[in-house]
Amino acid sequence: MTRAEVGTTVIHRWYVPYSHAHYAGNLVDGAYSLAAFGDVATELCIRTDGDEGLFASYSDVQFVAPVRAGDVIEIEARLVRVGTRSREMAFEVRVVGRGAPERGASAADVLDPPLVATTARGVVVVPPAG
């Protein structure tokens, strides 16, 4: 039996290590956000359907602000549509903390409000109930 209900939300927080910097300015590639979306979608499927589910598609992926090494990001998956076997989710990566190297090697700031970095929609498929 499924417990999938529209509005169900899962949030993870990650520190982005410097080993993940891919471009100048310690920028992290966009695939980092997509991998994060996969992880929160997996937990959401486990919570609602008792199964990890399988990603079927992403749509409307928007990279609206940079994610950098040293950031603390919050990754959210929110269930927006429940089908017989499909689950559509809205995703968001928000930067909630950012390093401030101009003030010192380990200086950092909390971003209030958080900076929305990446948004997307995705569809995950779960096994039939029963």
Image (cartoon, rainbow, N blue to C red):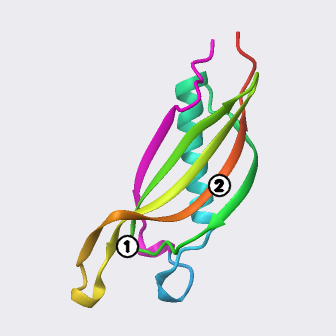
Q: Up-down: is 8 above or below 103? A: above
Q: Is residue 93 left or right of residue 107?
A: right
Q: Is residue 38 left or right of residue 14?
A: right
Question: Where, by quadrant of the figure, is residue 87 drawn?
Answer: top right
**Secondary structure state at the residue bearing disc 1:** loop
Q: Is residue 2 magenta?
A: yes
Q: Mark 2 points at which residue?
A: 120
Q: Residues within 10 Å of mark 2 (few under 14, many from 20)?
A: some
Which residue lies at the image location 54% right of the left edge and 32% below the top edge?
7
Q: Do labels 1 and 2 touch, CB within 8 Å?
A: no
User: Which is nearer the N-term, disc 1 or disc 2?
Assistant: 1
Which residue lies at the image location 54% right of the left edge and 54% below the top edge?
92
Q: Is residue 41 magenta?
A: no
Q: Which mark is residue 70?
A: 1
Q: Up-down: is 104 above or below 110? A: below
Which residue lies at the image location 53% right of the left edge and 73% below the top edge?
65
The quadrant of the picture occupied by the N terminus is top right
Which residue lies at the image location 65% right of the left edge and 55% below the top edge?
120
The quadrant of the picture occupied by the C terminus is top right
Q: Up-down: is 73 above or below 20? A: above
Q: In this view, does 41 lie to the left or right of 16?
A: right
What are the residue bounds of the magenta stretch?
A: 1-20
Q: How crowded is mark 1: few (under 14 residues within 10 Å), some or many (20 or more)?
A: many
Question: Where, by quadrant of the figure, is residue 69 drawn?
Answer: bottom left
Q: Where does residue 94 sit, x and y in percent of width and height?
A: 45, 60
**Secondary structure state at the residue bearing disc 2:** strand
